[in-house]
Image (cartoon, rainbow, N blue to C red):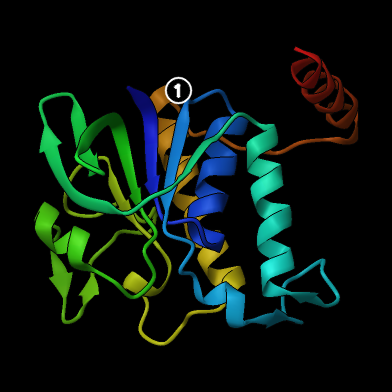
Amino acid sequence: MSDVIVVGGGPAGLSAALFTAKNGLSTTVFDTDGTWMHKAHLFNYLGIGSVDGSAFLETARAQVDSFGVERHEAEVTSVERTDDGFAVTVDGETHESAYLVLATGANRDLAEALGCAFDGDLVAVDVTMETSVEDAYATGAMVRAEEWQAVISAGDGAAAALNVLSKERGDHYHDFDVPADAEAVGELLTDEGDE
């Protein structure tokens, strides 16, 4: 059982996975690699002057992998609420988690099947990206009409992850690193790579 399952591996899903895994929650991502980022070129992503969307995804995937995210290229066929969290079906197998982040772009089928409330065609969420189903989050294009920029989607994923971390810690959680953290994180990632 994972702490967090993320369905979708675009900017929103990978951002959520990065924040949760970086802060000690076991995180699994299921993705079909059908993201629109493969058709994009980023000039408007703060901190990046210019990058091809596929190259951006390669970097983002390597980053989440370095923090121990378990990524699978597979389609999630169903999600349901359980007594302990969520059951996600992939290739006939069930995977469980305490939290669920839906980052499936404009495809809202899983949110509908889960029983999430909608506002028109959009999944209804609060400011933390939590849906009407407790501990289930929706991000990016599924909650925003025509606002599909990568930087917005990543921000939605981060908001969802920070709320999950706040719930787990029992207090408002802030993911804020300082330069001294870079050396410690670098050593941690190097040590894990040596194993």
Classify residue 34 by image quadrant. Answer: bottom left
Classify residue 140 by image quadrant. Answer: bottom left
In the image, residue 124 lies at what x, y percent?
23, 66
**Is residue 135 shown left or right of residue 19?**
left
Against 112, residue 41 (above or below) is: below
* Quadrant placement of the N terminus: top left
Q: Nearer the viewer, residue 56 or 125?
A: 56
- Residue at the extreme bottom: 146
In the image, residue 176 lies at what x, y percent?
70, 39
Residue type (three-letter) at the residue carrying disc 1: Arg
In the image, residue 80 lies at what x, y percent?
13, 43
Asked if residue 170 shows in the view, the reply is no
Q: Nearer the viewer, residue 92 or 10?
A: 92
The residue beneath circle 1 is 169
Against 149, residue 139 (above or below) is: above
Q: Residue at x 49, y 26 (%)?
A: 25
In the image, residue 84 lies at what x, y percent?
17, 24
* Quadrant placement of the C terminus: top right
Judging from the image, what secondary structure is the residue with disc 1 in? helix
Against 192, residue 19 (above or below) is: below
